[in-house]
Amino acid sequence: MGRSASIDRALDVLLSDEQASIVDLVLCARDGVVEAHAHDGSVSFTRRGEVTSVKGRNPLERQDPSAFSPLDDEMQHVRPTNETNHYPYAYDNAAQLFDDPRAPDLAVVHTPAHNWEERGGHRGEHGSLDLIQSRAPLIVSGTGVKKLGRIDREARMISVAPTLATLAGVQPLDGSILRAQEGRLLEEIIDAREQPDHVVGFLWDGANANVLYTMAEAGDLPNVARLMNEGTTYGRGCIASFPSVTLANHTTALTGAHPGRHGVLHNFFFDRATGRQIVTNSPDTWHDARDEISRDVETLFEAVARSGGGFTAAVNEPVDRGAGYATFDLVRAARGSGATMSSALPDPTTVAGATQAFVDLKREYGWATSADHLAVMQAKQVWAGQNGNPTPRFMWINLILPDAANHAGGPYSDIGHAGLRDTDRRMGEILDAMDWGGGGTAFLLVADHGMEESDPECKGDFDDALTAAGVSFRDEGYGFIYLDP
């Protein structure tokens, strides 16, 4: 059976009425054209976003990034159907994935309701092309940044790196700020009258933008609120690249390129040419994740070094290629000794400022608490030069508790809110140790993706249906389907 026939056979199964509650979209690329299919219609388009055909209803027609915002509006549209959902920048965001030859034959997008706990899923979910799972918060503040408050605009994850690079004084290369960047500089927030001495980026993994903004404005996240009050907040958030998963978008944020260009396609994917499963987002492989980044792109750490910008640091961040200091260099140095990141973590019940009720309740909450506590210690040490280093010109700090907490209970839950409060306290501890940059520092706060509440009653496994139909396939990351592997 030819590839196109295999795709059609799998589509018949995935788009059946029986799978409609768990399969939102199926994406594929054939003959230079990208296709997006839903159970009641499909659209085909080129890499440039030119629509070539529509059959039935166009499932990507709704692309308004201002929808479902602020939080009150989001709460009125919990788990929207494809007919009422929005998919910002959908044509570009879907098409870019298939630029990489290791892309799957089919990318299955779960419905917002689908709770695939039996396959490793959670009450809070992300990974989709849809708005709530793709919408991350974005706040830029401090020296060199205009104080515009909360603006009614959105940004894209591909714009984070060129904006940070500009603040850090990176010199353009071949007509762009970073090599092979695909995002634009957010010039509307740059105050060219000031050049920061230092630039610090915080990534709060898995934070829902509307929830974070609302809690900050209510006084629950005082350190986030201070950044918002002293800079610019993108009210519509920052739209992640597809798939809206961790390592794909960490890499996008730090290169300015989509996954289809930078090479980290998913947390799990497959290389047909070598027969190798690639796992990037795991405690056992984080220290090797940077090896999957294409040499055609440039990390922020490499760009700062190229421009003679000084010392850089990556704290608790796997995407650390080119950093002068990197947490995962410690793990790499211990390779072969049996030491792991987990073995270096403190007992979470001893961590001050942690919400112990949830540390005791959820193992993932405790593990992330320990990892973030270690990140706080390292960030303070590096900023103070305790490793014999100068104060970083550019520093990136990854805090992972929001993702663990929101997965456990969803973005509107008590445990999700506790994860944000704990993370705000930890970020505040770092900022206090920095004296909030001493007046010469620019700060950026972003997440790698959003978070959406699933329905615990909406279960099912489309892999079972494919198997029952006799389709030969390999499923990576639960949704990257490689046919006839």
Image (cartoon, rainbow, N blue to C red):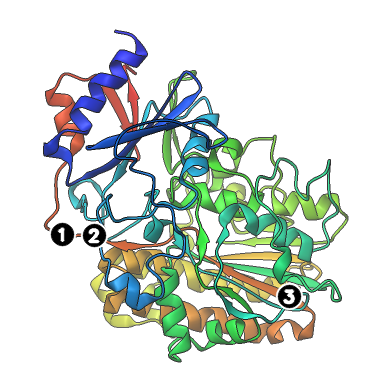
Say which amino acid is labelled 2.
Answer: Ser
Q: CA distance from mark 2 to mark 3?
A: 37 Å
Residue 191 x/y as whole percent: 79, 74
Question: Which residue is denoted by mark 2 in the rendering?
Answer: 454
Q: Residue at the location (52% across, 41% down)?
A: 92
Q: Does the CB distance between marks 2 and 1 fall below 8 Å? A: yes
The C terminus lies in which quarter of the figure?
top left
Q: In the rendered structure, find residue 145 and report the number of the disc placed on it.
A: 3
> In the rendered view, would you say 397 is above or below 84?
below
- Residue topped by disc 1: 456
- Whether residue 38 is visible, yes or no, is no
Residue 27: give its label: none
Other residues around mark 3 within 10 Å, as few (<14) / some (14–19) / many (≥20): many
| Quadrant where the image shows the N terminus | top left
- Tell me if residue 95 comes above or below residue 473 in the rendering: below
**Which amino acid type is shown beneath numbered disc 1?**
Pro
Q: Residue at x 69, y 82 (%)?
A: 147
| Element assignment for label 2 | loop
